[in-house]
Amino acid sequence: MHTPKCRRPSMSPTLSHKDLAGLAGCSALAFVLYLNTLNAGFVYDDRRAILANGDVTGAHPLVNLLRNDFWGTPLVDSGSHGSWRPLCVLSFRLNFLVGGMTPMGYHLVNVMLHCVATWLVFLVARTLLPSRMGVLAAGALFAVHPAHTEAVAGLVGRADLAACVCYLLAYLSYRRHMINREWGSLMLTIVLALAALLCKETAITALLLCGLCDVLSPVGRENSDKVCDGSFSGLASFNFQRRIRSLSILGFTLVCALYCRLSLLPRPSAAFSASDNPTAHESCFWTRTLTFLYLPVANFGILLWPQELSFDWGMEAVPRIRTLWDARNILTAGFYGSLIAILWKGSGLRRAASPMDFAEVANISLPLLRRLGGNSCHTWLGLTCACHHQLSAPSFRSASAIFSSSSPSKSTSWTVAPILGTAFLVLPFLPASNLLFYVGFVMAERVLYLPSVGYCLLFGLGFGHLWQRVNSSRRSRLMLLCGLALLLGIHGVRTCRRNLDWRDEEQLFRSAITINPPKALGNLGSVLSAQGKYEEAELALRMALGHRPTMADAHFNLGVVHQKQLNFSSAVPCFRRAIELRPQLAVAYLNLGTSLISLGDHRQEAISVLRTGARLEGNGVRDRGAHVEARYTCYLQLSVLYRSEGRLQDAAAALRESLKALPLLPQKQRAVLHLRLGEILAELQDWNEAEHQQRLALQLQPEQGAAYVTYGQTLARNGSRLAEAESWFKRALQLAPLEPSSHHHYADFLEQQERHDEALSLRLRAAALAPQDYTLQSCVADALRLLNRLAEAELWYRKAVTLQPLAAHAHANLGAILQMRGLRKEAVACYQKALELQPGHAISRANLARMNVHKDENE
């Protein structure tokens, strides 16, 4: 039997000069609009996802990218968010390796990803939309849309940007595969889809979209990658089998990806809080149903008119729908009705109810007629066809045989494009919609980045349709262009202004006060407190609590404001209320204990509070790193408190407990615990164990001069090992020659050996390295006094007074040196100033008594 010879049709989607100009224009527009984000900083979630994430800064090994979630918390942790995005975190890590913590590099990558996404949207539109103007409108709208600001200007939005890029590349790769059914393009599609999934979870729908495109689109269906002179029915069967094979591979890959993501990888075990997603905690079924059905409408409203934007839509930013008579239900019904109408119009259901398209009849019947010996579809099964298709040609090609991936035929675009545009809009949004399962937010603008591709495609389709309908009217086309330019201009101005909100946290939180007042005011209060604007911070926090009195963070931050103002009696009830609302908030226990200590007569209660905070397991806490840091500080503070009361055994026990309870502490912090424990053991004269702890600290932090200094101090307590102790002090100086404390502690050692001249040179070096440090300046004065260089000592004591003018002991020290120099009147003035600042200052009283000041005055 003769084997038919086949040839490949051309499948290179060439771009015309107009297409290249439109592509470059849209990408340039996207870049220019976001130039003002390059000087922005790290804001909001960026701090936790980048600055405090050991997977980004290199504090954790590279393999931890596969073990930890997006925020650097182990996936098996009870408080893990469950968002596994290793490729996105890897991109942050590469940013860190190149530019450290300079934010410009991170923002530049985000802007470039948005430009690439815009470029790809243009190419995707070119595969679906029949009008070049429609393609241009879709690409330009995507470039300027203000809803993209959070994804581009907020660094954590890189997950959405990268996922979108991979998602669109996967679609374009599969379009190529549909033309020629090559294995390479199919494998590339799968790799790109999985890469999108590793950037963000919502991209799991990429394979589903590709399969839907294969089912609906005529690409590669009328023609195969071979034009043959053999049997048409055999060719059709061959094409059908290859399409089924492609769809089966897509389906199998999708099932495997879902299984791995849901079964092999740990899922979050902690429930999202009521403030994050209040509707999910609503007890009424109808309230939950009506509200969640409305949320896609609210998101679509942001795409339609993005004038009200917020960094957070939690709490009551979107009020729940509690009754059928809520007017928003009308919008819900209209929205879903419109979606159904688009699908109905684009599907074959509408055409099935109308008279049969005889061209389609011909395409179906001709292969069969050839087998039956016929040569025309003019009459067949009682139907009359006016197309008069003939079989005389040796190779049959239907009217839509070549459906180029870059230039779709108009006859199919008006049916396929609405469905695929709607699929681009709906499918990526479904995982974040709360309709399939609850997520940790009500709405989030960055989640709309990928679904907005579908919105822009539908807009471009409509604009292109209008453009073609007014083909003969220049005036109408001019009006259309003016309308498009006006829309793009409004969106562009809104985008530029919104970018400014994301430059710093204060402006970002202020911009959302009208939309989500409790969250915005609470966060604003924290920012103002960090800036030292305590009165404004207190006002903002009290306003936030007025809107929502159960905000534990707001109570805590208000306590911090009082604490910074040294108003400890007001801070204590704020911290107690924060603990009552969130019992696992370890940092609240730490600050409460600190405030109780500062009050002076609550030391035993402070010990109890700090012990409780140190032992909190933190089940379900989101920021595991901050929780562990608070527990670590509680243990340190507890050991200091025990040590100040002379309870050295209890202090040592607390530090030993911390080393066992916090095994995942960073090496630097574990080294500090070993150092502190070594100091206490040295005071207990347990020399061997003290030395052992110091050596453990040195092993953990061999590059830290403080560890060598502490070890030297420990050895110096043992009179028989002074030479060895001095060698460790010298090592510390070699390792950290610019560290003032290394010189300071070595000078202490030398003074104990009565080597005052050597000690003075070290004191001077330490003071020069830290000219604003009161203690170091005062120590230089003491060293000069020991050498009887009183005039020089006076100058240094005066300098110390200028550094701490409200410190009584500073004036008392100056008075003492003046008294030694015989400057009696000036010395008395210094002592009296010290007593004015601290009426019970014992040294000043004693020195005045020795000078017999009162007797002289009576005389």
Image: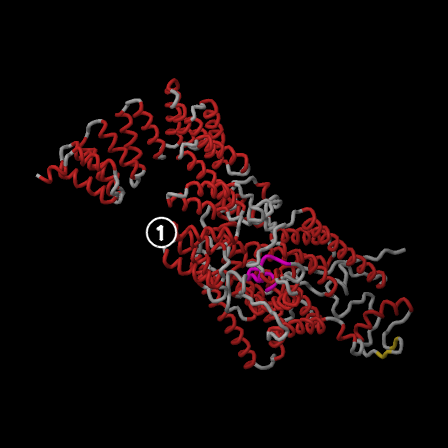
Q: In this picture, is 619 found above or below 518?
A: above
* Frontmost residue, 600 versus 16: 600
Q: In this picture, is 559 found above or below 306?
A: above
**Residue name at image x 60 percent, y 58 percent:** 164
Specify the farthest residue to the right. 372
The part of the chain drawn in magenta is 438-452
Q: Is residue 796 visible?
A: no
Q: Amino acid at mark 1?
A: Gln
* Frontmost residue, 499 versus 323: 323
Q: Is residue 538 highlighted in magenta?
A: no
Secondary structure type for disc 1: loop
**Residue name at image x 49 percent, y 45 percent:** 98
Q: Position of residue 684 (x, y in %)?
A: 43, 26
Q: Position of residue 652 (x, y in %)?
A: 47, 31
State the residue position of label 1. Answer: 565
Assign the C terminus to one quadrant of the image. Answer: top left
